[in-house]
């Protein structure tokens, strides 16, 4: 099963993608996580990506597309994957479509996690990410057992630089201009499904599973 998660930054794509990956036993491929890992490891790609990410801008398509397409060659992608944060522009969606068409495949579902802008700033201001394993929490909606420490690995939690309010507004603007058109793109392909992302995490998950089937 090949699934794309769509939605504004902070809508809950990553939260849902992790649960879907576990349920359907497919990898969760997050371009944001890949870039953050590259930044942490000090790679050339990480250095290039960081300037865009810190400004709340998208990393240029040419730095993203091959990275994702190459990832599909890994053996864990044999039964599909859940893409989180990719595609984010029409050219990325077209490149994905073309790469899959070459091997006679296509995306099965594009799931739009719909959350209005008013809720997004709160969501992202309260998001905390683990510096060790990358797990995400929310200070109100999904708190850790011990404040400031990851439940899974015990490392410290941080507020991502790009989750600070001034950058969030930029990212929302970028989302509306560059990523939201993908909703029409996938609707036109007949594979778009929308879920109400303002519900609690469990309810959102149940709605997605109902769409995908057991
Ligand atoms: P995205 O991957 O779309 O940027 P995340 O999955 O990281 O978003 O979620 C953003 C923040 O909102 C996180 O702190 C997460 O714990 C929280 N969150 C996710 N889904 C919900 C939900 N349904 N209700 C409330 N908070 C949520
Ligand atoms: P995310 O973790 O998905 O919120 O992504 C964090 C940041 O990484 C984004 O604000 C972009 O700067 C960059 N990024 C992640 N995925 C992509 C993509 N598909 N295209 C361009 N930039 C991306």
Image: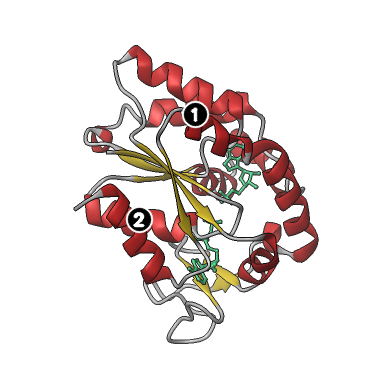
| Residue ID at (45%, 75%) | 150
Residue 7 position in % (x across, y down): 55, 50
200 lies left or right of 103: right
Q: Given the current orientation, which residue lies at the most extreme right position?
A: 166
Foreground of the two, 193 or 164: 193
115 lies left or right of 206: right
Q: Which element carries disc 1, helix, strand or loop?
A: helix
Residue 103 position in % (x across, y down): 30, 15
Task: From the image, tell me which residue sits under label 1.
Answer: 188
Q: Nearer the viewer, mark 1 or mark 2?
A: 1
Task: From the image, tell me which residue sits under label 2.
Answer: 208
| Residue ID at (62%, 74%) | 126
Q: Is residue 214 above or below residue 182?
A: below
Residue 92 position in % (x across, y down): 55, 27
Residue 197 position in % (x across, y down): 50, 62
Q: Residues within 10 Å of mark 1 (few under 14, many from 20)?
A: few
């Amino acid at each position: 099963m090949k699934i794309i998660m769509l939605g504004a930054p902070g809508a809950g794509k990553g939260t849902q993608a992790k649960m879907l990956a576990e349920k359907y036993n497919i990898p969760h491929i997050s371009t944001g996580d890949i870039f953050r890992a590259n930044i942490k490891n000090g790679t050339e790609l990480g250095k290039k990506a960081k300037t865009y990410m810190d400004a709340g801008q998208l990393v240029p398509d040419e730095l993203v597309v091959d990275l994702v397409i190459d990832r599909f060659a890994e053996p864990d992608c044999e039964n599909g994957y859940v893409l989180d944060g990719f595609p984010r522009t029409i050219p990325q969606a077209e490149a994905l479509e073309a790469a899959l068409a070459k091997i006679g495949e296509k995306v099965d579902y594009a799931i739009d996690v719909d959350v209005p802008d008013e809720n997004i700033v709160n969501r992202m201001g309260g998001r905390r990410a683990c510096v060790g394993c990358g797990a995400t929490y929310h200070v109100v909606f999904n708190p850790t057992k011990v404040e400031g420490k990851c439940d899974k690995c015990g490392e410290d939690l941080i507020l991502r630089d790009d989750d600070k309010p001034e950058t969030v507004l930029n990212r929302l603007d970028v989302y509306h201009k560059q990523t939201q058109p993908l909703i029409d793109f996938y609707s036109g392909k007949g594979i778009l499904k929308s879920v109400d992302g303002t519900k609690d995490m469990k309810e959102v998950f149940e709605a997605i599973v109902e769409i995908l089937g057991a």
